[in-house]
C-alpha cells in the first residue's frame, strides 16, 4: 500500500517525480482505453528499464496452449488470453545521434504524469540531461478517441534547453510483439504486409490460430515553430515500419510531432479492406486535426460524466477514488457491441487471461444498467445468449445431457478457457449469476422482452444443469450438490455450499415462473422455445422436486446457514487473532492450509444475502454478517464492496466506510502490491455499488425505486445519478438531508426510507 | 486387453510375428535391467517406425521445470524425472549401402522375441527382405550383467540369404537424447568429451542442473566365421561416436558383432575417473568374453530364482504372470544401495517421473523382506531416514514446525517433486505407510535395531506432523483431519478420510510405544534422540490427546466406517449398474464427476483393514468388503492385489483368483491399454503378496510365522519360499495338502491354520 504515490486531486491522477521502481505500476494506473482498444502508459520513446509493454484490442485474443501438471478429462485445449497487440505509440528519439532513454539519462527532473479523467487524456512531461550532456524538455499528450474508436493521437514535443542539437524523431509501428505471460513462447502474430506511403504507414498482421486480421496504422506530422517539417526517410523491415524526421534545433527551439495511430480489425471490416479503412480513419483524423479531436474527446467524456459521475465533497481521496473507478469502467467497456465483454484487467494487463467472468453479471451489470442506456445491459445479456450453444457443449464435455448448460468460468468466445479442476469444473455458481442477471435486468429496466426473446432459453439450459448436478442423498433425505467451489475460492470441492445450493433452487424456481409468464403473455415465443428445447411437464416436475427439496446446511447452535457441510469442523480462529505476519494468507500459506482454514476470500453466504436480500430479515443478515465477516480476509478485490453494502445496510457506517476505501482506492493505493500487473476493473463496478446501493441504499422493490440514504461522517455530501427506466434521478445526500431531482417529462414516485416521495421534473425534493 | 499377444510359456516371454503397432508395447514388455540400469527393448539397428527409445541409469534424474496452470504456494520448483540416458545399444546396419530398417523392409518373417526370465537375457531374430532385394537373417541377444552391473553385452549376427552383399555394421554411442516427456524441450545432457581408441569409444556427459557425470562406453568386436574382422574406421561428432566394420559377405555367410557397453557414473566413481573406470570394466568384460559373461548371468539369475521363485502348476498363464512380476522386480531393484529406490515404472518408461512413492513401503517392502537378505529391507528403510531432514523442510514449507516431517509424495532425492495440490499437499497418508514399514520390518525380521538407530527419529517427525495436522472440532468434540486425499484418489480434499485418520492415530500410538521401548532398552540412543528432537512429556501428552480422541466417521445404518465424512451423501450406484461404455471412468468422465461419484480407485478402508487386520474381526472385514468393493473400479494397478488378499481371507476363492489374474497379467495382457508407456513395477510386488499372503495366508503374528493355505481350483499346486529371520521355508500347496520344508540348522515352529507345526531342517512336513 502506498498512499503518497498518487497526488490527491478531484479529477486527475497525478504522479510527480520519476521513480524507476514505479514505472510498471504507473503504466497500469495511467492506462487509457476507449472500449475498442486500450493500452498501458508505456513511454513513446525507448525505455531500457523495467517495463511492461501492453496494447490491447477488444475481442482479439489468442488460444495459448494450456500449461498444467497433469491433465484432467474435460479440460479445455487452450487458455485464451487477451492478446498483446502491435505497438503503434512508439517514437524513437535521437539527440545528436544518442537515443533518449529515461533509464540512462544523467538527470531527470520535473517529471510529471497526469491522467485527466474529466477530459480523457494522458500527459507526461519531464526535463532530462542525456548522457551526451544535452538537456531536453519533453511533453507528450495522448488519448484514444471516443468519437473515432479505431483512432488514438499523440502530440510529442521536445525542446533542447542548453545547446543547439540535431534531433531525430522516428515514429514507428512494431508487430514483433509477444505476450508477457505467453505459456510456450509461441509467436502470436503473423505479419503479412508492411508498407508506407508519404506520412502514413501500415502493418497488416493476423493472429495465429484465431485469424483475427488487423491493420496497425499511423500518420505522422512534425512541426518546427508551427511549420511542417518534411520526413527525411521511411524504412521498413519484417515487423517494423518507421518514418524519420530529422531537424537541427537551436537552443530553446521546439520540435513537435503529431502521431495518429490505431487499429482497423476484421471484426469491423472485411479483411482485405483493412488498409483502406485505416486510410479512411486517418483521412478523418487529418481533416479534423489534433486540436479538434482533443476537443471532441473532452465533449465525449463530459457526456459520460454527465450521467455517471459521483461527487463526494469533503474527502478528496474518496472523490478521486470513485472517479478513477468510473473512468476505468468506461475506458474498458462502453456497451455498444454485444460481442465484447469486460475483462477483469480491462486493457491494462494480461493476468486472468480471458475476458469474461461472472464478475460481469454479478458486479458490472448494475453499474452499466444505471449509468447507460439500457441497450448496454441488453448487450451484456445477449453476449451470454449468443454463447448458449457453447455452454451446452461445455456441459456435455462434463457428462451432462439434454441441453443442460454450464457457462464457462472464463471465456473469450463462449468456450471455457481456464483449467484448474476446482474452478473450471466446480465453481459452478457462475451459472446462477448469469440467471440472476436476467432477473436483475427485468427488475431494474422493467423491460421483459429479453426473457421471451432470449433469456428463457438460457434459463432452461441453466435449470437443466442444476437439476442434473444435484443428487438425492438418502442420508439427508434431501437433494445435495456435492463437490463444488463457492465464491469463496479458499474452500474447494466442498459439499452443499449454501450459496450454490440457494442459487440452484432459485434458478429453477425462477425459470418455472418465467415459463408460466411467457406461456401466458408470449405464446409464439413459448411454443418456439418448447419446441426447440423439447421441454416437458415431466421434466419440469423433476426440476421442482429438486428445488423444493434442496438441502441447506444450518447450524442451530449459531443460528446461521453454514457455508458448506464441513464448516463447523474447522478451527474457528478469527482473522483478528491471526498474526499479521501470516497475511495475506494467499501469499504466506500453502493451499491445503488455506483450504482447511476457516478463512473466507470473499463474500459467500453474504453474497447470497446481497443478491436475495428480500428473502431474509435484517436480523438474519446481522447474524450472518457477525458470524462470517470475522473469518473473511477480503483477499479478493470483489469482497470489500459487498461487505460495505451490507455494513451500510446494518447502519455500521464506520465499517462500511473502511470497506469502501479499500475497494475504491485498491489500485491507486496499491493495497495488494500488484498494481503493476494491471488494474482490477470488474471490482470497480463494486465500488460504484457501494456508493449507490450501500450508502445511497438504492433498491428496486415491487417495481419501485427505493433509497435509504446514509453518509459516512468523513463526507460532507455526495451525489450520483440513476437512469431508472429512462428517467434520470439525481440523488444528493448530506448528513442533514437527501435531495432528489428528476429529469424528464412525467412525474414519478419513489420511496425514501420507506416513505413515498413524488418527484416532479425539474424540482428538487428534499427529504 | 490382449490375451494372445504373448505366448504362454513358463519361463519365457515370447512374441511371434512382427507387428508395427506393437513395437512400443513390446519395447516395454521385453525391457531388461540389472538394478543399476535398465532399458526398453529398442532395436539395435535403426528403426524409422513408431518407437519409444529409453535407457535409464538408476539414481540419475533431471529436475525438469514443472508445468502447471496456476501456481500454489508450497509447490516444488521442479518435477524430477527419471532421465533418458545416452544410447549405447545402437548398431547401424547397411547392406549394399542401404540401411536395414524393419519399418521399410519389403517383408519380415520368422520374427521372434524372447525374454528368458530364467537366465536373464533378451533375444530377437527375424528374416527380412530389404528394399534392395537382399534377404538377411538377423539374430541378436542382449543382457545387462548382474555380475558387473555397469555392463551390458550384445551379440548381433547377420547372414545374407539370397546373394552376396557388402555389409557394414556400425556400433555407436549417442548422447543426443531427450526425454519423451520433457516439459520444456530443455536439453538434459551436456556432452563434454567424445573419444575413441582402437575398438573402444566413450562419451562423457553430465546432466544439466543435477550434474550427474557419466561415461557411456562401448567396445566392439566383429567376427566372420570365427575370425576377427578389423574396424574400417571410427568417427565422432558432438554427441556421437561410432566404429565401422565393413565386410563383403558371400551368400549364406554370417558376420557377427559383440558389443559391450554401459555406463560408469559419478555416484560410484570420481568424475575424472569415469573413462578409466569404463576401461577397467571393459578389460574385465574382454577378459571374460561374451560366453562366460552370459554363463555368469545365468548363474546369477539362478541364484535369484532359487530364493524368489513361485511355481504354479496347472496354469501356464498364471505361472508366466507371477514369474514376469518377480523377474521385473529383480530387474528394477536389488537392494544393494540405500541411495536407490523403486520407481513405479522401473527402467521401462518415464511416466510418474520420480522414483519413490509410498508404493515402496506399502507394496514392495514385504516382497524384498521375504525373498532377500534383510539388509535389502534395511536399505529401503534407511533411504527414508536419510531423507528425514528434507521431509522436515517439506513440512515447513506447508506451515508445520517443530520438526514435523511430511515425506514427499514423489521424490528422487527427498524433495517433493510432484505438484497437484490435492496430491502433493493432501495425500498425506503416505507418511503413515513409512511409519508402518518400520513396524513391519521389525515384525517380520525381528531386528529391532533399526528403531533406536534411525527409525524412532522418523517416527517422531511423522507423529509431530499428525499432531499438528489434526484439529479439534468443537462440533464433533473430537480431533478431525480436514482436507485430505486418501489412497482413493477419486476423492479429493475430503474430511476425515478413515484410512488417514486411522493411520494418524496408529502412528502416534506406535511412536509412543517405541519411545518407551527405546528408553527401556537403548538409553544412549534414547538420550541422543530426545536431545536432538527436544521432545518433552508435554508434547507427547498432546499427541496422546489427539490420538485418543481421533474422529472416525461411521454409519450405524450400514455398520461400516465411512471412507470420509460425506460418503453417504453420494449417489450410491454400484459399479455393476454402471454402463460398460462409461468405464474406465478416468478416461470417460471429467474429474468433478469422478469426485462426486461413489467410485473408488483402489482399496482405501480395505487398505487399512489390510495393514491392521488384527485390529478387526473377520465379520467386520466382510461387512466392509461387501459395502465398498461394489463401488471399487480398480483403476489403480495397486487395487486388485489387496482385494485378492482380502477375498482369499474371506474364503471367496473365485473372486480372489479373478483379482489375482488381473494383477499378475496386468502388463502381459495389457488390461489398461497403456503398456507401451512402461510396466507397472511396484504393483508387481502386490502380485507376489496375493500369492504368499492371499493364497498362502502367510502372516506374522506374535513373532510367529502363520499360514492359512488356500488354492484356486484352477491350479494343481503352487509353491513359494520365505526367508523368515534367516530361515528359508519352502511352502507347497495343493488342494489336498500343504507341505513345508525348512532349510537351515535349527528346527522352528510355525502355525498352519492356527495349529502349531514343528519344522525340522530337511524334512518335509505335510499338513
Image (cartoon, coloured by chain):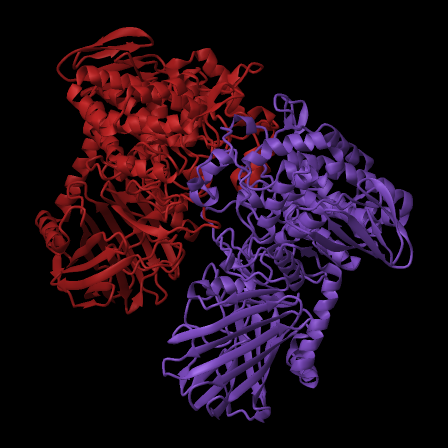
Chain colours: A red, B purple
Looking at the picture, tell me which residue is in the foreground, A32 or A19: A32
| In the depicted structure, whether residue B368 falls above or below residue B531 | below
Residue B505 position, x and y percent, is 72, 35
- A481 horizontally vs B455: left or right: left
User: Which sits in the foreground, B84 or B273?
Assistant: B84
Residue B516 left/right relative to B667: right
The spot of residue B414 in percent (x, y) is: 65, 54
- Tell me the quarter of the picture where residue A756 sits: top left
Q: Where A311 sits versus A124, above or below?
A: above
How many numbered marks, from 0 up? Answer: 0
Query: Does B413 sit left or right of A146 as displayed?
Result: right
Q: Is B330 located above or below residue A336 in the figure?
A: below
Q: Where is residue B707 in the image (x, y as percent from the top left)?
A: 78, 45
Q: Which of B272 and A552 is in front in this view?
A: A552
Q: In percent of the image, x 18 and y 56: which residue is there?
A: A218
Question: Furthest-front residue in view?
Answer: B736
* Residue occupying image coordinates x 74% and y 50%: B733
User: Could you say which quadrant of the image residue A604 lies in?
Assistant: top left
View extreme (top): residue: A755
Asked whether the viewer can see residue B148, the reply is no
Amino acid at each position: 500500500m502506498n498512499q503518497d504515490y498518487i497526488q490527491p486531486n478531484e479529477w486527475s491522477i497525478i504522479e510527480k517525480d520519476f521513480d524507476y521502481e514505479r514505472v510498471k505500476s504507473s503504466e497500469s494506473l495511467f492506462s487509457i482505453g476507449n472500449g475498442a482498444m486500450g493500452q498501458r502508459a508505456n513511454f513513446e520513446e525507448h525505455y531500457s528499464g523495467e517495463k511492461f509493454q501492453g496494447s490491447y484490442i477488444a475481442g482479439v485474443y489468442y488460444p495459448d496452449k494450456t500449461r498444467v501438471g497433469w491433465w484432467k478429462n474435460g479440460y479445455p485445449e487452450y487458455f485464451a488470453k487477451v492478446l498483446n497487440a502491435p505497438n503503434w505509440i512508439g517514437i524513437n528519439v535521437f539527440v545528436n545521434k544518442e537515443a533518449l532513454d529515461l533509464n540512462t539519462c544523467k538527470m531527470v527532473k520535473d517529471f510529471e504524469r497526469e491522467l485527466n479523467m474529466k477530459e480523457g487524456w494522458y500527459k507526461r512531461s519531464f526535463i532530462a540531461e542525456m548522457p551526451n550532456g544535452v538537456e531536453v524538455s519533453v511533453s507528450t499528450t495522448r488519448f484514444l478517441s471516443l468519437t473515432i474508436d479505431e483512432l488514438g493521437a499523440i502530440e510529442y514535443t521536445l525542446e533542447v534547453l542548453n545547446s543547439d542539437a540535431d534531433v531525430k524523431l522516428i515514429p514507428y509501428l512494431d508487430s514483433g510483439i509477444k505476450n508477457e505471460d505467453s505459456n510456450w513462447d509461441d509467436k502470436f502474430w503473423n505479419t503479412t504486409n508492411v508498407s508506407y506511403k508519404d506520412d502514413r504507414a501500415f502493418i497488416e498482421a493476423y493472429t495465429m490460430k484465431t485469424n483475427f486480421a488487423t491493420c496497425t496504422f499511423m500518420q505522422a506530422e512534425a512541426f518546427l515553430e508551427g511549420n511542417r517539417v518534411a520526413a527525411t526517410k521511411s524504412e521498413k523491415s519484417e515487423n517494423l515500419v518507421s518514418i524519420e524526421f530529422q531537424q537541427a534545433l537551436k537552443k530553446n527551439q521546439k520540435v513537435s510531432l503529431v502521431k495518429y495511430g490505431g487499429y482497423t480489425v476484421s471484426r469491423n471490416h472485411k479483411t482485405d479492406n483493412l488498409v483502406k479503412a485505416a486510410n479512411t480513419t486517418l483521412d478523418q483524423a487529418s481533416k479534423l486535426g489534433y486540436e479538434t479531436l482533443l476537443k471532441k474527446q473532452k465533449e465525449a467524456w463530459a457526456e459520460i460524466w454527465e450521467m455517471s459521475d459521483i461527487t463526494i465533497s469533503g474527502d478528496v481521496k474518496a472523490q478521486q477514488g470513485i472517479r478513477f473507478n468510473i473512468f476505468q469502467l468506461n475506458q474498458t467497456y462502453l456497451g455498444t457491441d454485444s460481442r465484447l465483454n469486460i475483462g477483469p484487467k480491462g486493457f491494462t494487463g494480461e493476468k486472468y487471461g480471458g475476458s469474461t467472468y461472472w464478475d460481469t453479471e454479478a458486479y458490472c451489470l448494475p453499474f452499466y444498467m444505471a449509468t447507460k442506456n439500457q441497450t448496454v445491459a441488453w448487450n451484456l445479456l445477449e453476449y451470454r445468449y449468443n454463447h448458449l450453444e457453447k455452454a451446452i457443449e461445455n456441459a456435455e464435455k462434463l457428462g451432462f445431457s439434454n441441453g443442460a448448460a454450464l457457462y464457462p468460468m472464463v471465456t473469450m468466445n463462449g468456450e471455457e478457457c481456464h483449467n484448474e479442476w476446482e474452478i473450471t469444473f466446480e465453481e459452478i455458481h457462475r451459472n446462477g449469476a448469469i440467471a440472476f442477471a436476467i432477473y436483475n435486468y427485468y427488475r431494474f429496466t422493467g423491460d421483459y422482452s429479453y426473457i421471451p426473446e432470449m433469456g428463457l432459453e438460457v434459463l432452461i439450459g441453466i435449470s437443466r444443469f442444476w437439476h442434473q448436478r444435484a443428487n438425492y442423498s438418502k442420508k439427508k433425505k434431501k437433494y445435495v450438490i456435492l463437490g463444488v467451489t463457492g465464491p469463496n475460492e479458499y474452500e474447494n470441492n466442498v459439499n452443499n455450499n449454501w450459496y450454490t445450493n440457494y442459487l440452484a433452487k432459485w434458478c429453477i424456481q425462477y425459470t418455472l415462473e418465467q415459463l408460466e409468464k411467457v406461456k401466458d403473455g408470449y405464446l409464439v415465443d413459448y411454443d418456439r422455445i418448447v419446441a426447440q428445447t423439447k421441454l416437458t411437464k415431466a421434466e419440469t416436475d423433476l426440476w421442482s422436486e429438486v428445488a423444493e427439496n434442496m438441502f441447506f446446511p444450518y447450524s442451530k447452535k449459531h443460528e446461521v446457514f453454514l457455508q458448506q457441510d464441513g464448516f463447523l469442523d474447522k478451527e474457528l480462529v478469527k482473522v483478528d487473532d491471526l498474526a499479521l505476519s501470516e497475511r495475506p494468507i494467499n501469499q504466506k500459506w500453502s493451499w491445503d492450509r488455506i483450504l482447511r482454514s476457516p478463512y473466507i476470500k470473499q463474500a459467500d453466504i453474504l453474497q447470497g444475502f446481497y443478491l436475495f436480500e428480500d428473502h431474509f430479515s435484517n436480523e438474519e443478515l446481522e447474524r450472518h454478517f457477525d458470524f462470517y465477516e470475522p473469518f473473511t480476509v477480503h483477499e479478493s478485490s470483489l469482497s470489500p464492496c459487498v461487505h460495505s453494502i451490507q455494513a451500510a445496510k446494518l447502519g455500521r457506517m464506520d465499517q462500511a466506510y473502511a470497506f469502501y476505501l479499500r475497494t475504491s482506492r485498491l489500485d491507486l493505493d496499491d493495497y495488494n502490491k500488484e498494481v503493476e500487473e494491471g488494474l482490477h476493473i470488474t471490482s470497480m463496478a463494486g465500488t460504484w455499488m457501494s456508493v449507490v446501493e450501500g450508502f445511497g441504499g438504492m433498491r428496486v422493490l415491487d417495481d419501485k425505486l427505493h433509497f435509504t440514504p446514509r453518509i459516512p461522517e468523513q463526507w460532507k455530501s455526495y451525489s450520483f445519478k440513476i437512469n431508472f427506466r429512462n428517467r434520470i434521478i439525481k440523488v444528493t445526500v448530506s448528513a442533514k438531508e437527501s435531495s432528489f431531482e428528476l429529469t424528464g417529462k412525467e412525474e414519478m414516485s419513489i420511496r425514501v426510507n420507506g416513505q413515498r416521495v413524488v418527484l416532479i421534473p425539474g424540482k428538487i425534493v428534499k427529504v
